[in-house]
Image (cartoon, rainbow, N blue to C red):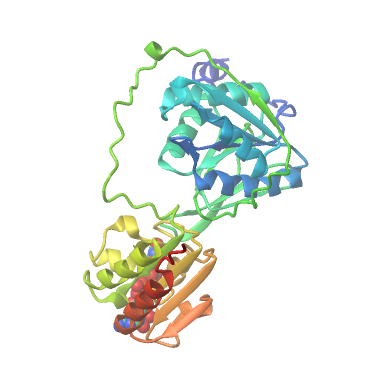
């Protein structure tokens, strides 16, 4: 009896078998900023589509914001069957309380068996807030997802300082929740021919009841956004020092891309840790990735192997990076990179047509 009371006090379900059979389908919480969805949301829908088909269950998306109806339509084009849309001025900027209230209402009403969101700053905050309220299990920062014959979500993530991959299950509670690293999954091609249903959800909220206020967004001048970059020019120990990155910056600027680095370069203090790609850095999926003076250690490769095209520049013809590169140039980067930059500059000069 005491145990039962304790469970009740901390909000846990009573002991014994609970019938979760009403919970069906996968829900992806779509993250948007200023009316633009984050790429990780579409990547997640792509993977969740596969899982939903395996479970023979619907794929749902939850879109929250102010004037974000267009994102609900986009979610259908990227694979969702049903989109729950909560559109209200109070949801303009991300704030834990109003966002988690909408999420909790949608989860409790529509009962998805799995809830996924991006492991971004806001995704991690929101997922934690919801999981503790439901309460249910949450696997953070997953890099692999699957479902088994018993409809259990198998969420895998690196653990113990990234030395092993742990597969975590949530057997007794629903929904099973996971946040998922950006860049590891691929979005489906956007299909304007897909159809789906948009269901509007409203939650009674008044601005005066929300304690958090967003006064201003200050854009960090040095903000690094590797996850969204289409072109990445990454340097490693081979660049020889902080000045070596200037050569890479020139190439990145020419191609409208951003620079990045291996852990060897960030550990040596040549460039900030925010630029690190790999297992303990950011996982990226650009259209074009230059690995320059990077040997291709497995911990680096896991963070960039899903790039559409990989170009490696290295003076060692036996460097492992050449095994995964689509194009490889054996040579000294201080010779090769300026030549590449010049060649791109010549070809990318805008042609003026009259
Ligand atoms: C738990 C753990 C987590 C880790 N996480 C990460 C991670 O997230 N990201 C990561 O990158 N690493 C990570 N590492 C480290 C990783 O194992 C490698 O040590 C690291 O990636 C090596 O970086 P690098 O390729 O720049 O350096 P090196 O392996 O030293 O390679 C330098 C390369 O530059 C070439 N070179 C040298 N001079 C020139 C030149 N002038 N022109 C052209 N080529 C040149 C060399 O031939 C060589 O191939 C992790 C390691 C551990 C144990």
In-front residue for pair 150/48: 48
x then y, percent, for residue 143: 53, 53
In-front residue for pair 8/26: 26
For the N terminus, give its image quadrant: top right
x then y, percent, for residue 16: 67, 25
Q: Is residue 311 left or right of residue 252?
A: right
Q: Dividing the picture into quarters, in which one does residue 194 lie?
A: top right
Q: Is residue 268 left or right of residue 179?
A: left
Residue name at image x 44 percent, y 58 percent: 162
Q: Dividing the picture into quarters, in which one does residue 22 lie?
A: top right
Q: Is residue 222 left or right of residue 105?
A: left
> Which residue sits furthest front?
354
x then y, percent, for residue 51: 69, 47
x then y, percent, for residue 79: 67, 43
**Taking the image as drawn, is residue 130 in sight?**
yes
Vertical arrangement, residue 209 with respect to residue 110, above or below: above
Which quarter of the frame holds ligand 1? bottom left
Residue name at image x 65 percent, y 52 percent: 189
Number of disc labels: 0
Residue name at image x 42 percent, y 69 percent: 348
Q: Is residue 187 left or right of residue 234?
A: right
**Taking the image as drawn, is residue 168 in sight?**
no
């Amino acid at each position: 009896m005491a145990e039962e009371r304790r469970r009740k006090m901390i909000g846990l379900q009573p002991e014994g078998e609970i019938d979760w059979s009403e919970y069906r389908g996968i829900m992806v919480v779509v993250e948007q900023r200023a009316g633009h969805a984050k790429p990780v949301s579409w990547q997640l829908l792509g993977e969740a589509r596969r899982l939903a088909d395996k479970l023979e269950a619907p794929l749902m998306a939850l879109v929250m914001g102010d004037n974000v109806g267009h994102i609900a339509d986009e979610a259908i084009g990227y694979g969702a069957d049903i989109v729950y849309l909560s559109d209200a001025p109070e949801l303009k900027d991300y704030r834990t309380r109003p966002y988690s209230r909408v999420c909790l209402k949608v989860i409790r009403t529509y009962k998805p068996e799995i809830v996924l969101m991006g492991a971004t700053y806001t995704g991690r905050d929101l997922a934690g807030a919801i999981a503790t309220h439901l309460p249910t299990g949450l696997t953070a920062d997953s890099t692999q997802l699957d479902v088994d014959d018993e409809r259990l979500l198998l969420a895998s993530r690196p653990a113990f300082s990234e030395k092993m991959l742990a597969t975590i299950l949530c057997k007794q509670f629903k929904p099973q929740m996971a946040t998922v690293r950006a860049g590891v999954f691929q979005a489906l091609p956007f299909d304007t021919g897909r159809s789906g249903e948009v269901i509007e959800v409203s939650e009674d909220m008044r601005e005066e009841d929300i304690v958090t206020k967003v006064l201003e967004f200050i854009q960090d001048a040095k903000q690094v956004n590797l996850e969204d970059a289409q072109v990445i020019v990454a340097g490693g120990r081979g660049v020889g020092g902080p000045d070596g990155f200037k050569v890479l910056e020139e190439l990145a600027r020419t191609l409208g891309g951003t620079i990045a680095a291996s852990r060897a370069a960030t550990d040596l203090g040549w460039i900030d840790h925010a630029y690190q790609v790999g297992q303990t850095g950011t996982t990226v999926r650009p259209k074009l990735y230059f690995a320059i003076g990077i040997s291709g250690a497995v911990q680096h490769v896991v963070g960039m192997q899903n790039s559409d095209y990989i170009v490696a520049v290295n003076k060692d013809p036996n460097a492992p990076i050449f095994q995964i590169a689509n194009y490889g140039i054996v040579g000294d980067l201080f010779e090769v990179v300026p030549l590449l930059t010049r060649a791109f500059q010549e070809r990318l000069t805008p042609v003026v047509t009259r």
